[in-house]
Image (spheres, helix red, strand yellow):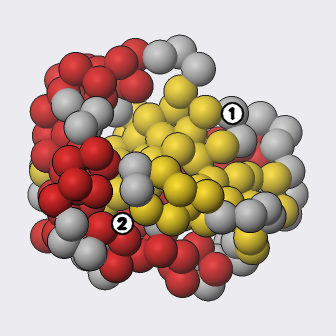
Amino acid sequence: MEIRTACKSDASEICQVLRRSIAELCHDDHRGDPKILDEWLRGKTPETVTKWITNPQNDMLVATLDGKIAGTACRHGNQITLNYVSPDARLLGVSHALLMALEDRIREEGGDRVMLESTTTALQFYQSRGYRQCSEQKQKFGIIAWPLSRQLEAGSSLC
């Protein structure tokens, strides 16, 4: 697996990964409800992804397996805004590798805490990596968003 910074030419493939991950892996969140899926997927277009990639305040990564994008993650400061894996790469450590890469970058910039909003689908994944709920859950795209945070230890990734 290779983790690298996303580039504009990745936008369409990233978009496909995002849309498939949401539709195929996040059933605990959308429960097959077409209204929720439509709302959640609405902004997941190659044009929007290109804006995320080119925003100088974002740090967007991709994980590749055999030359194909297997997952993507993004941060804005110490806030992780995306972490999605292709259904084809589920349970291969892609989300974990992306999370560690973003945490390392936050740590390298002197950050000591990372925050994110988890889906219900990913909640156990983040909790098993030391993330804890830091405020009341809220609704986002018609699903529950779980605000989580984790204190980063200086100099080392959580394995």
Q: What residue did someone put label 2 on?
A: 94
Q: Residue at x 84, y 39 (%)?
A: 110
Please tell me whether residue 7 is drawn above or below residue 79 in the rendered image.
above
Q: Are marks 2 and 1 in contact (CB under 8 Å)?
A: no
Q: Is residue 131 left or right of residue 24?
A: right
Residue 121 percent location from the top left of the image: 41, 76
Q: Residues within 10 Å of mark 1 (few under 14, many from 20)?
A: some
Query: Which circle marks residue 77 in the picture?
Result: 1
The three-letter code of the residue at mark 1 reads: Gly
Q: Is residue 142 left or right of residue 10?
A: right
Residue 119 percent location from the top left of the image: 47, 66
In the rendered image, is residue 57 in sight? yes
Q: Which image quarter: residue 94?
A: bottom left
Q: Residue at x 47, y 74 (%)?
A: 120
Location of the C terminus (image quadrant): bottom right
Location of the N terminus (image quadrant): bottom left
Please tell me whether residue 112 is drawn above or below residue 99 in the rendered image.
above
The three-letter code of the residue at mark 2 reads: Val
In the rendered image, is residue 10 in sight? no
- Secondary structure found at label 2: helix
Could you say which is closer to the camera, residue 93 or residue 13?
13
Q: Earlier in the sequence, mark 2 or mark 1?
A: 1
Q: Residue at x 61, y 84 (%)?
A: 128
Could you say which is closer to the camera, residue 151 or residue 133?
133
Cα distance, mark 2 to mark 1? Answer: 21 Å
- Secondary structure found at label 1: loop
User: In the image, which is nearer the foreground, mark 2 or mark 1?
Assistant: 1
Please tell me whether residue 159 is drawn above or below residue 153 in the rendered image.
below
Q: Is residue 118 left or right of residue 87?
A: right
Query: Which circle marks residue 93 in the picture?
Result: none
Could you say which is closer to the camera, residue 89 or residue 117?
117
